[in-house]
Image (cartoon, coloured by chain):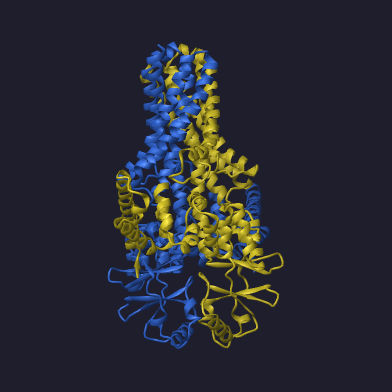
Chain colours: A yellow, B blue
């Protein structure tokens, strides 16, 4: 039995051992290099061989998911050293487990032959995950090597967008007819001899593969052997279509606690199935990509990718941020005259802008979450906006007064304190309105509100905050 | 068969219909009120009765998860109207499905008797989810009403922290002995007559409940009826302990694609099981709470909670932000003399600070993700820091030069442009160092790096950015 606690420790330990072995390996190479030993002498060297054998043994003992973990945690050079040592027949499985960014670094290191060999170990639905990262000629060769049924399946899977059920489904379906008894069904299963992973139900179809219902194994093992499949099967099962979005599927899996579910075409013909492990991976990836994009990273990034690749991944949001910062700077530029007269304004203005941004982001996060859960619509917009305005007004009056007092104590200027309080309150109200409206507008124009809402809010509360504070100061203090 | 697309539409439709019915209900009430009709006349009124009957019918037809969705999407007053109409015997299930924040609003509306009735419908593991939200006297009464076995289970579940396996496990375990044949096992199952949800395997135990292995239903239905359970069962199954963290369990479920797994005590005695639906809920909740805390919300917030509750939920981070903004403001205060002489500094300084914050947050997000996946440790810290510094240097030189040029064009001051470029580069380098180190330090001191890293980074890059830019300007321009 595998203890999960031990798994975790041994995984961290494995990583450490592998790094030690890699370093020893480098050390030997380095020594050889210094003594100008010819390359073949190095290859022959006993120490070197021992080292590699030990590393190889270590890697062979690990689950593919664990090898993937180790590859992710290593800088590029060491990663490729380890990758070379992984047994060729495990390449396919491991490529499926690593993240997209790391997969690209591994594939870049393989030649066409190795890639084809790796691909041949995989099922059609697994191939579909890998295919987009393969070089075009390898993909073509791969398609040619498949039989017509699997080629059709792969091409169909590739024709759906990444986040459609059609791209996530697999083809490991076990079907039975409805006009047999459970005893016959069990005899049939024993003839097959093994069932695909995650099989919790059999799909009941007619002779044209039209789905009639599902027979959970749970029922198969407790119901009377004489009963007919038709009497025992569940007919009110949740079904998906290839063009449904993965997001809807994930929600349905969570809502109805599914383990597997049939995927049917428009004629109710069974074409595949969706399993909970795929759905769980999807949920995890989505959550991560939301988090990354909220922070302005374009996509998942290999921690050890080259500096240049990282710069490309990040520059888009930095550029947008630069433009918004420049606009805010120009707003200040308009009031340079006022700042020249009361230089305290320069020191106080970032506070007004900063708190507005923080508060606006809190609001937006709430709204983005509500939108993702489908809980925000026309009917409750008004109550939401009213509540957020209330929160902002209260926060503005409380914190604005505190800051107004501080400003008064620092600069001994009562009017300046009052302007500070007023500007804080107004900017927080602006932040509330924008925090609610920006994600809604983005959704209306078909964009993902999780991506970029934060940058837009901050842009508004910065420029708005500077304008409100410096504007009020110019009116009341000069 | 339920089409997932239809489900979604009909859910949105249901919500719309319920809102319409609620509004009509209010309208009738309003009319009655205006005409000063006595209250009992209203209750008798036919229209009113029809309305409620229709609403009730609508609600009864919905899955508990769907009723929960509708309760979440309604403002407090309407939510409680709907809650009153939900059949009492479904209260328990529905309370389990709603979010913590909404659950509190519903429980606050129920008296002890209703709460006890709702609790009695639930299994022990479900009770454990509900118990922390129940008033103390109700919880005590509930404990008294349980038999000793279930009371022990509930007390044990409550003794584990929310994010421990012990708090997430359930007790729906079906056990068999290893010395019987599959045929006998199947006969036994048919006698039981039904299996708990998500049963994908039976747990094989000895007479002292010590776990010997697991028998997947998948194997039970395909293997020879004459084989012994001991020969067919899997012995290398992943097991959990009640004190394992939910986070480790979630990773193991994803890594090894589990549907259910046994939970054992230190003597390998079977005490419960963990199911994929619980794990999936946990993953979803964790992802959400990370997102909320990154934005500075203390916890999940009911969208329609009172203004005062929201203010409390948000004020902690706003207060911290206020302090950091104040410090940044004091940094500027030190250089007021320089700003008085060159007022352009006031307009340009927020750009340097803003871009630094953005870049630092990108770095931190990468690191927080790496830490969460367990991929960052001593061995790769140096490569990570080197890479991030490289990215920052490149970004600083590119974008710093652009901004330097812009500053030169705007103010016709070459030296000012150069100071701008230098300050941008230095602040981005500061952002890289802090972006890597802050999450690592937080982890070292046992804090969740997802919570608050962003606020700390921004504090550093704001104060640091102002200091670097105004400092350089004071040295080179005055």
Above or below — where is B350 with respect to A239?
above
Left or right, residue A93 beside residue B39: left
Residue occupying image coordinates x 52% and y 54% = A111
The quarter of the rendered structure image containing the N terminus of chain B is: bottom right
Horizontal and vertical percent position of residue B276 = 46, 64
Instruction: Out of A449 and B443, give the one closest to the viewer.
Output: B443
Residue lying at 42% horizontally and 53% vertically, measured from the top left: A71
Q: Position of residue B258 (x, y in %)?
A: 45, 66
Q: Quadrant of the C terminus of chain B?
A: top left
Q: Nearer the viewer, residue A53 or A147?
A: A53
Is residue A394 at all visible to an observer of this figure?
A: no
Q: Nearer the viewer, residue A274 or A197?
A: A197
Residue A322, given in percent of the width and then of the height, sits at 53, 29
> A306 or B361, which is in the foreground?
A306
Is residue A385 rendered to the left or right of residue B336?
right
Is residue B156 visible in the rendered image? The answer is yes
Residue A18 is situated, as x and y percent measured from the top left of the image, at 34, 55
Q: Residue at x 44, y 38 (%)?
A: B361
- Quick check: B196 above or below A389? below
Q: Residue at x 41, y 85 (%)?
A: B228
């Amino acid at each position: 039995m595998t203890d999960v606690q031990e798994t975790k420790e041994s995984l961290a330990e494995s990583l450490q051992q592998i790094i030690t072995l890699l370093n020893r390996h480098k050390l030997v190479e380095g020594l050889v290099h210094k003594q100008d030993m010819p390359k073949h002498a190095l290859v022959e060297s006993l120490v070197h061989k021992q080292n590699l054998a030990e590393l190889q043994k270590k890697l062979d003992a690990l689950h593919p998911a664990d090898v993937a973990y180790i590859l992710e945690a290593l800088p590029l050079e060491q990663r490729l050293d380890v990758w070379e040592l992984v047994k060729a027949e495990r390449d396919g499985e491991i490529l499926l487990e690593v993240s997209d960014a790391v997969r690209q670094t591994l594939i870049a290191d393989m030649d066409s032959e190795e890639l084809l060999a790796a691909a041949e170990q995989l099922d059609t639905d697994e191939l579909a995950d890998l295919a987009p990262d393969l070089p075009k000629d390898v993909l073509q060769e791969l398609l040619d090597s498949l039989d017509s049924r699997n080629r059709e399946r792969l091409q169909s899977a590739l024709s759906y967008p990444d986040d459609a059920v059609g791209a996530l489904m697999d083809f490991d379906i076990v079907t039975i007819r409805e006009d047999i008894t459970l005893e016959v069904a069990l005899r049939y299963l024993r003839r097959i001899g093994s069932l695909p992973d995650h099989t919790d139900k059999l799909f009941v179809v007619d002779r044209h593969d039209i789905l009639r219902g599902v027979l959970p194994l749970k029922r198969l093992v407790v119901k009377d052997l004489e009963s007919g499949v038709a009497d025992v099967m569940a007919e009110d099962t949740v079904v998906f279509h290839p063009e449904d979005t993965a997001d809807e599927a994930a929600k349905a899996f969570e809502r109805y606690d599914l383990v597997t579910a049939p995927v049917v075409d428009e004629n109710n013909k069974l074409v595949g199935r969706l399993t909970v492990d795929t759905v769980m991976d999807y949920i995890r990836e989505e959550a991560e990509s939301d988090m990354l994009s909220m922070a302005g990273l374009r996509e998942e990034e290999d921690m050890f990718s080259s500096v240049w690749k990282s710069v490309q991944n990040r520059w888009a949001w930095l550029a947008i941020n630069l433009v918004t910062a420049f606009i805010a700077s120009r707003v200040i530029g308009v009031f340079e005259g006022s700042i020249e007269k009361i230089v305290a304004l320069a020191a106080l203005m970032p506070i007004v802008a900063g708190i507005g941004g923080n508060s606006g982001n809190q609001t937006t996060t709430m709204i983005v979450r509500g939108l993702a859960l489908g809980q925000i619509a026309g009917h409750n917009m008004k109550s939401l906006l009213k509540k957020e305005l209330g929160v902002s007004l209260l926060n503005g009056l409380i914190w604005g007064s505190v800051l107004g007092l501080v400003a008064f104590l620092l600069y001994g200027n009562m009017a300046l304190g009052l302007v500070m309080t007023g500007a804080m309150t107004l900017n927080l109200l602006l932040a509330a309105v924008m925090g609610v409206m920006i994600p809604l507008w983005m959704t209306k124009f078909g964009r993902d509100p999780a991506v970029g809402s934060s940058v837009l809010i901050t842009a508004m509360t910065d420029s708005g905050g500077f304008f409100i504070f410096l504007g009020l100061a110019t009116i009341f203090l000069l």
